[in-house]
Image: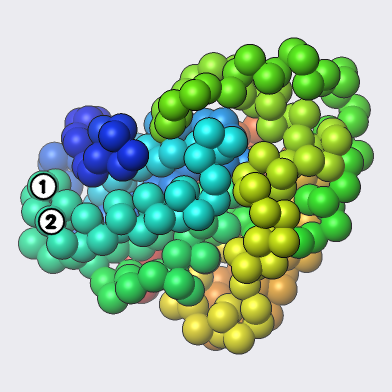
């Protein structure tokens, strides 16, 4: 497997990069555009465990993983604007940059990245999107579990504002391995102020929440979620599976949010094997 960094677009004077993962000895079947998770506050494009990258590329699927601006330095309107520009860049020229003969792709997101994928598929011109892959994602921001202090987050030592305020930069942040950014996210979940970190206008969270009608307009979806997810309610993926017209939903018996990170052999690998089968059929 090869991993090649490439430049994409310039957004708010920041040059954004992507990583192109592929297997040069395997004929490509398709491309996955990957949007990482992290509550839009922490994380980076290269967070997919190597074993899954190897499985997908060995099966003939190239992966292009994106940087994007993080909150609270950038708010949701700028984040989605940037992600839309990245996908338009891929559809217009990016596919040629990675040696693909056509611009067709699948959107792949985990957690916040899955939410972004659903939102973009509903609000942007994604004429070449063949489907969405959503791992433990959501479609509504105005969920009570997001708006009030999170029980699971409160099991961790309390994060004080004074401890994390210095993490916030004066300039755009689009790639960070700084563990303190996770503490900033944890602060938001412990205090119920997560949404305030994502937008200056709290009422906007309704604007970014998808309706049933919008869910019914989504393309084919492969989605999976832990039944006892403590961070993102299982009911959100369950509702997507009920409302969207063509879904393949795999509930997972786990108490972990990102089960494919914590249980690679027992849960993650079997799910990615099913994902590859789904991709082969779509």
- 93 or 133: nearer the eye? 93
Q: Circle 2 sits in a helix, a strand or a loop, which is it?
A: helix
Front of the two marks 2 and 1: 2
Displayed quadrant of residue 32:
bottom left
Whether the residues at callouts 2 and 1 have beta carbons within 8 Å, the answer is yes
Residue pictured at 69% horizontal, 26% vertical: 184
Does 72 appear above or below 210?
Answer: above
Displayed quadrant of residue 260:
top right
Query: Which quadrant does the C terminus fall into?
Result: bottom left
In percent of width and height, residue 134 lies at: 54, 58
Q: Is residue 21 left or right of residue 190?
A: left
- 181 or 273: nearer the eye? 181
Q: Circle 1 sits in a helix, a strand or a loop, which is it?
A: helix
Q: Is residue 272 left or right of residue 226?
A: left
Point out which mark residue 97 bears.
Answer: 1
Residue pictured at 83% horizontal, 42% vertical: 192
Asked whether the viewer can see residue 228, the reply is no
Does 242 appear above or below 146?
Answer: below
Query: Which quadrant does the N terminus fall into?
Result: top left
Residue pictured at 53% horizontal, 34% vertical: 73
- 120 or 56: nearer the eye? 120
CA neighbours of label 2 inside 10 A, class few (<14), some (14 to 19), many (20+): some
> Which residue carries the number 2 mark?
93
CA neighbours of label 1 inside 10 A, class few (<14), some (14 to 19), many (20+): few
Asked whether the viewer can see residue 33, the reply is yes
Residue pictured at 85% horizontal, 35% vertical: 191
- Spatial CA span between label 2 and label 1: 7 Å
């Amino acid at each position: 497997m090869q991993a090649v960094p490439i430049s994409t677009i310039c957004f708010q004077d920041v040059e954004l990069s992507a990583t192109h993962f592929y297997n040069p000895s395997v004929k490509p079947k398709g491309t996955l555009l990957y949007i990482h998770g992290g509550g839009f506050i922490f994380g980076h494009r290269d967070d997919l465990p190597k074993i899954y990258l190897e499985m997908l590329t060995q099966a003939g699927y190239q992966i292009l993983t994106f940087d994007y601006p993080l909150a609270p330095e950038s708010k949701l309107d700028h984040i989605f604007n940037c992600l839309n520009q990245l996908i338009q860049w891929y559809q217009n020229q990016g596919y040629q940059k990675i040696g693909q003969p056509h611009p067709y792709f699948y959107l792949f997101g985990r957690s916040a990245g899955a939410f972004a994928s659903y939102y973009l598929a509903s609000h942007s011109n994604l004429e070449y999107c063949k489907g969405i892959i959503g791992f433990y994602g959501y479609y509504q921001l105005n969920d009570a579990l997001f708006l009030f202090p999170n029980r699971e987050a409160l099991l961790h030592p309390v994060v004080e504002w004074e401890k994390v305020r210095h993490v916030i930069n004066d300039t755009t942040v689009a790639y960070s391995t700084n563990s303190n950014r996770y503490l900033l996210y944890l602060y938001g979940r412990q205090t119920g102020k997560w949404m305030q970190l994502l937008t200056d206008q709290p009422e906007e969270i309704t604007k970014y929440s998808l309706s049933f009608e919008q869910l019914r307009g989504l393309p084919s979806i492969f989605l999976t979620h832990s039944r006892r997810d403590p961070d993102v309610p299982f009911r959100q993926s369950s509702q997507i599976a009920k409302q969207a017209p063509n879904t393949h939903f795999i509930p997972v018996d786990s108490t972990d949010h990102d089960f494919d990170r914590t249980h690679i052999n027992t849960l993650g690998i079997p799910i990615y094997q099913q994902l590859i089968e789904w991709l082969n059929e779509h």
